[in-house]
Amino acid sequence: MDAAVIVVGAGPVGLMLAGELRLAGVEVLVVERLSRPSGESRGLGFTARTLEVFDQRGLLPRFGDVEISPRGHFGGVPLDYTVLEGAHFGARGIPQSRTEAVLADWADELGAPVLRNRELVGLHDTGDGVDIEVRGPRGAVRLRGEYVVGCDGGRSAVRKLAGFAFPGTDATREMFLADVAGCALRPRPIGEKLPGGMVMSAPTGDGVDRIIVCERGAPPRRRTGPPDFAEVAAAWQRITGEDIRHGRPVWVSAFGDATRQAAEYRRGRVLLAGDAAHTHLPAGGQGLSFGVQDAVNLGWKLAAQVLGRAPAGLLDTYHAERHPAGVRLLRNTLAQGLLYLSGSDVEPLREVMADLMRLDVVGRHLAGMVSGLDVRYDVGAGEHPLLGRRLPDHDLVRGDGKIRACELLHPARGVLLDFGADAGLRTAAAGWSDRVDVVTATPYAIEDGSGLAGTDALLVRPDGYVAWAAPGAAVGLTAALERWFGAPLPIRNPPDEKGPQ
């Protein structure tokens, strides 16, 4: 094997997955078609849940000052995220190129090499491994891995070569996205609907404006490269009456509203993540964020499989958990596109939606959906409100000091949080000490709605989701540990109950 796992695609999703695998000790190789990062930044931040994911790996400080916004929109209708406890839209003003650079540095530090200027042209799953062929400056080279993961975008070569079905709908319109310098445009951060279409503009710094242009009736086109800036400027002028031809394009691209999802996220030893698994209108900046969440869900499971300690069926839970989440993603982006990009005939629907969104229950539902904070996985029956949900980033008192819950997840291991100083929990989990850390702590100043009130213990997966709780879970701790972390190691000596906490 050239690597246990070969990741195809060195965008944010592929790099996040590579880092997750390296944290678990798995050898990984990243193969990328481009000779260097494109520098384009389709996204300008990430959602609240993805911000938490980066925080759980200790990555957030690498982004510098992060602007948090409590306001967003759903299909152009303003949405207040403060209706959720401690919630926000997410991080703004962080170009995707910056996110990619942060993740590239992190993956490199962890020992994940990136093989650039290598285009995937062949793939064959042999049953006991995957052979791929990549074409580079010196011709074709064959590589072999135990598993291959396609993180190579909406036109994924991995998906096509491995024969994944990709049902959905084709694009019905074309839109332009560009960064333009020297225009000093009036900010239109949510977007402005005009008779000829919709435009957005927002300053990104250094005299550059990010613009989106959606001209009503513009048909989708098959392009072999980006559009000319003159084409973008002409569309902008037809819609707004403003002339931006004097501007300097930093980069220009076109995109559509095609909506498709892979029928399965795993075929044998080949898996898909990010846009390779689902493509949609980039409404609300969910694309990059959702892909990163795919990678974090998959990473620890694939690592356990490679290392031979995965319980039966663990790797299949990647599809079982992320495919339904992807269905909801596509549904909400389709709805937003209908509200956002349709003409005056949809105005009554927009007005009704605006009325509904003033109700807290509707605002909470939509804010949770778009932010990624409402994701709940099926981890088994039980009554505890946190089962299957993300661990709240609550302050915990441990020993003489405080620690944030997210810091416990920096190593990407399981965590058994013991809130009652129960020595029996440490003994019960001793067989999983190579995979699960036992932490004795107490929540600091429990907030309403946190789900921690009356909780004695929580078992948290490496991706930050609660897999077991006491009281409230329908199964015991041992059953939960075996389901998510496999068989225990034999214990030769009893654990030291008075050891480090």
Image: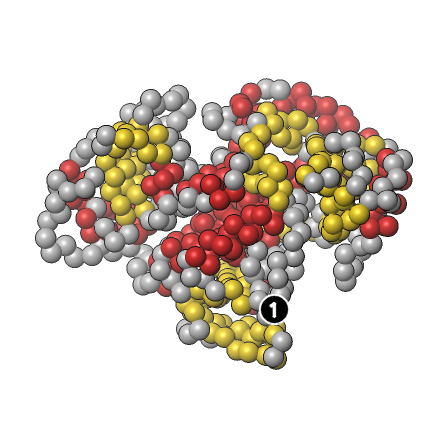
Residue at 61 percent of width and 79 percent of height:
138
Could you tell me if residue 486 is visible in this image?
A: yes
Could you tell me if residue 196 is visible in this image?
A: no
Describe residue 18's horizontal placement relative to residue 459 as left or right: right
Amino acid at circle 1: Asn
Q: Position of residue 435 (x, y in %)?
A: 28, 52
Describe residue 410's horizontal placement relative to residue 171 as left or right: left
Reply above or below: 220 against 91. Answer: below
Furthest residue to the front? 206
Residue at 53 percent of width and 32 percent of height:
368
Location of the C terminus (image quadrant): top left
Instruction: Choose between 406 and 205: the one closer to the eye.
Output: 205
Reply above or below: 295 against 36. Answer: above
Q: Position of residue 127 (x, y in %)?
A: 44, 73
Residue at 22 percent of width and 32 percent of height:
399
Reply above or below: 478 against 138. Answer: above
Mark 1 falls on what kind of element? loop
Reply above or below: 343 against 410. Answer: above
Instruction: Choose between 61 and 118: the one closer to the eye.
Output: 61
Describe residue 87's horizontal placement relative to residue 419 as left or right: right
Q: Position of residue 261 (x, y in %)?
A: 60, 52
The residue tagged 1 is 117
Q: Quadrant of residue 290?
A: top right
| Mark 1 Cα shell of 10 Å, populated few (<14), some (14-19), many (≥20) | some
